[in-house]
Structure formats: structure tokens, C-alpha cells
Amino acid sequence: MKKKLYTCFGDNGCTSTLSGDCVAKDDCLIDVNGDIDSLQASIDKIVAFSMNNSDLSEDFNLLEKIQVLLWQLGGEISQRSAGGVVNKPVKESDISLLEDAIASFDLDVKGFQRFSNLLAIEVNESRVRTRKLERSLTNYLRDEKLRSVSYKFVNRLSAYFFALAVKIEKENFKIL
């Protein structure tokens, strides 16, 4: 017998957190996790493009690491406590990894940037979703329910996606 893909648990407007708490679906915790899910879906597209595009092969491993860290961040947030039990929490070295990647692009950006390359547009969409997540996390940081290193990582992640989009635009990567 196949297992059902639905539980009916959410039919009353509540959902369960990682720690087992029942919270309303409009709780800010669910909004934050929704923002993480939205960003993950956007990154999935970039990862799919990078698997078939030699121009993005260098970024593939970093993109996969970013996805793991975001998943871990969601777990940490769901536990409603800073530094909750997760396997691979965000560390300062993860921020350095993003900063090194940005520096390696060796970009000189002046003024407002528009994108016409479809892949650059997709990457910029990830930047936009990252900025939304950052805004959602601000209260958690202020209330000390989020480690500052995690917030800093999300902030640097938006810069990484912007830089990657600019690189793709300037080098005119092709979607294969």
C-alpha cells in the first residue's frame, strides 16, 4: 500500500515545526521557511543549468553547498532558538567562501545593472529571493533567535548572486 502524500494536519490552518510545535500557517516562522523554500527552488534552476553548462561548472559545487546551508538554516529557525541542533550550521568560513567567489569574478560594476541574458535573469531572481529572506530574518536577528553569522551569510549570498548574474551577463553564458 502506498503512503499518502498528504496528512490533513494542515486543514485547520496549522502546521508542525521541526521541533514538533503546532503553529499557525501565517506565523512568521512559516513565512521565513517559505522564503527559504522559494530561494531553494530558484537555486534548483541554476543548479540544473550548471549541470549542463561548462561555463557554470565551477559554481556547481558552491551552489550545492549553499543549498545544504539554507536547508540547515531552515532547521535552525524551525527550532526557534539560535544555534539549534543542525548537522552543518553556517560558519564564518562559509561567508569567506562566498566572498572569495565574488572576488574571483574580478568585476567592475558601475551604476544600475539590468540583465538580458536568460541565465543572468534567473540568477538575479535568486538574488531577489535572497533579499526577501534577509528581510524576513531581520526580526529573528534582532530578537537573538538567529546567529549573526547566519544573517551575515544570507546578506553575502545576495551579493554572490548579484556578482554571478553580472558575470554571466558580461560573458554571455548560454543556456544549453
Image (cartoon, helix red, strand yellow):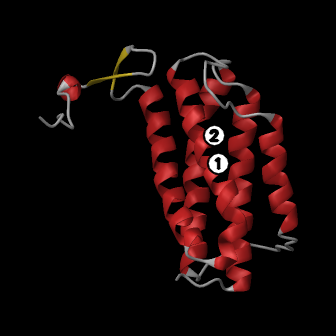
Residue 175 in sight from this viewpoint = yes
The residue that label 2 is drawn on is 69
Residue at 47% x, 27% y is 29
| Contact (Cβ within 8 Å) of mark 2 with mark 1 | yes
Q: Quadrant of residue 116?
A: bottom right
**x, y percent for residue 152:** 75, 38
Q: Which mark is residue 53?
A: none
Say whether residue 18 is left or right of residue 108.
Answer: left
Say whether residue 57 is left or right of residue 36.
Answer: right
Q: Nearer the viewer, residue 13 or 99?
A: 99
**x, y percent for residue 163:** 74, 65
Residue at 64% x, 83% y is 173
The three-letter amino acid code for the residue at tag 2 is: Leu
- Label 2 sits on a secondary structure element that is helix
Q: Residues within 10 Å of mark 2 (few under 14, many from 20)?
A: many
The three-letter amino acid code for the residue at tag 1 is: Ile
The residue that label 1 is drawn on is 66
Residue 113 in sight from this viewpoint = no
